[in-house]
Amino acid sequence: MKTETDMRTLLIHGGIDGDDVTGAVNVPIYQTSTYEQNALGELRGGYEYSRSANPTRKALEALIADLEKGTDGFAFASGLAAITAVFHLFKSGDTIVISNNVYGGTFRLLNKVFPQFGLNFKVVDTSDLEEVKQAVSEDVKAFLIESPANPLMTITDIKAIAEIAKENGILTIVDNTFMTPYLQRPIELGADIVVHSATKYLGGHSDLIAGLAVTNNKELAERLGFTQNATGGILQPFDSFLLIRGIKTLSVRMDRHIENARYIAEFLKDHPAADQVYYPGLADSDGYEVNRRQADGPGAMISFRLNEGYDLKKFYTSLKVAKLAESLGGVESLVCHPASMTHASIPEEVREKVGITYNLVRYSPGLEAKEDLVKDLENAFKESRR
Ligand SMILES: *Cc1c(COP(=O)(O)O)cnc(C)c1O
């Protein structure tokens, strides 16, 4: 597809559209591990073994490359498998600079797994460009950022970070999970690699775990493709199909997620139970202008601090529509407690320092009627009032 195509169209027709052989409008699920060869050294359709390549996965990989305006896409068994594969591009002695609000599992990988192999990391507030410049040194080979970052919805200026990176020969990696390419395309802003937990908005139905990565050039694609095949954390054909199916409806889902998020954020802002509301769609939020400049919308993730006049445990159990669960971006509203759930792998003193306090609540509005979601919150506040 040409890159000028509207994103809403591209979501449905990007990548490999349908099946040329039968005319099926959907890419078939090629549930096969291997492919018969015509003769020694002579493949029939270019496929050899499904860890290396599979037509259903390939369709998904072509689709995400189109959506993110990159050269190549790669599909993995989870977001963390995608991020792990990307980390394998680096070597012992290299340092990766990450946002202080990076996803807990990403932090755990860099804090517990990769140090065993000599890959180091530095934590900075990437919303502060001066701090980012200060962090640059000879051994720094990559910036890994999220915008908005989990769970305080901190906005980082992706273009400015990519410029600092380019001046210093550093790669910019953006975890675009919260925004999706429908709202934000980091490669257009100068990033080299985009990663996704496709488990969230891209899949959109809380029924699969998947990860994606996209590169902005062929040299990186070659290396990441090698790593994908060599380390083997690939996405299965059926899950690839589910993810393609999810992506087709992303524009309508995301529009509704945002409509609901705005409504809920406005409600929370005026409610005494919420001390502070974090949502990049609120005009007085930090990073509002930067986000408007670099993205086509504020996304739909909200966090707030529950006032001490309310019982936190009671609040969670009093919600009846929103379910208490890890994850986000599905059709159903989910609420979570970052300090003990998504960010539990971050040491407490680090958590407190970056604002992931015990009373912080994260809310992922689903596609239910927004009035019902607000009623649900109103009732939970009433029930949990001390
Ligand atoms: C969930 C998540 C991940 C990890 O993805 P999995 O699919 O759970 O492995 C990475 N980054 C962000 C921002 C996430 O929300």
Image (tube, rainbow, N blue to C red):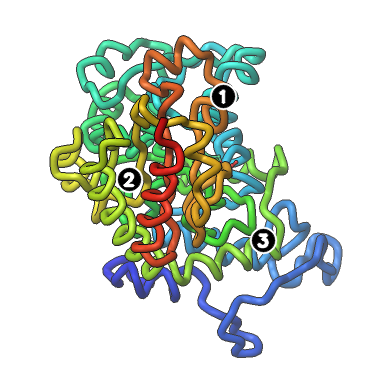
Residue 176 image offset from top left, x and y in percent: 40, 45
Callout 3–callout 2 Cβ contact below 8 Å: no
Q: Is residue 263 visible?
A: yes
Callout 3–callout 1 Cβ contact below 8 Å: no
SS state under label 1: loop
Q: Which residue is mark 1?
A: 344
Q: Where is residue 151, by image quadrant?
A: top left
Residue 7 image offset from top left, x and y in percent: 33, 67
Q: Residue at x 43, y 54 (%)?
A: 376
Q: Amino acid at mark 1?
A: Ala
Q: Which mark is residue 239?
A: 3
Tell me if mark 2 has few (under 14), some (14-19) or many (20+) residues whose alpha carbon lies within 10 angstroms of its own. Answer: many
Q: Amino acid at mark 3?
A: Asp
The number of callouts visible is 3
Q: Is residue 332 above or below residue 172?
A: below
Residue 42 image offset from top left, x and y in percent: 78, 65
Q: Which residue is mark 2?
A: 186
Sequence-wise, the earlier of marks 3 and 1 is 3
Question: Distance from label 3 to label 1 (Cα)?
Answer: 28 Å
SS state under label 3: helix
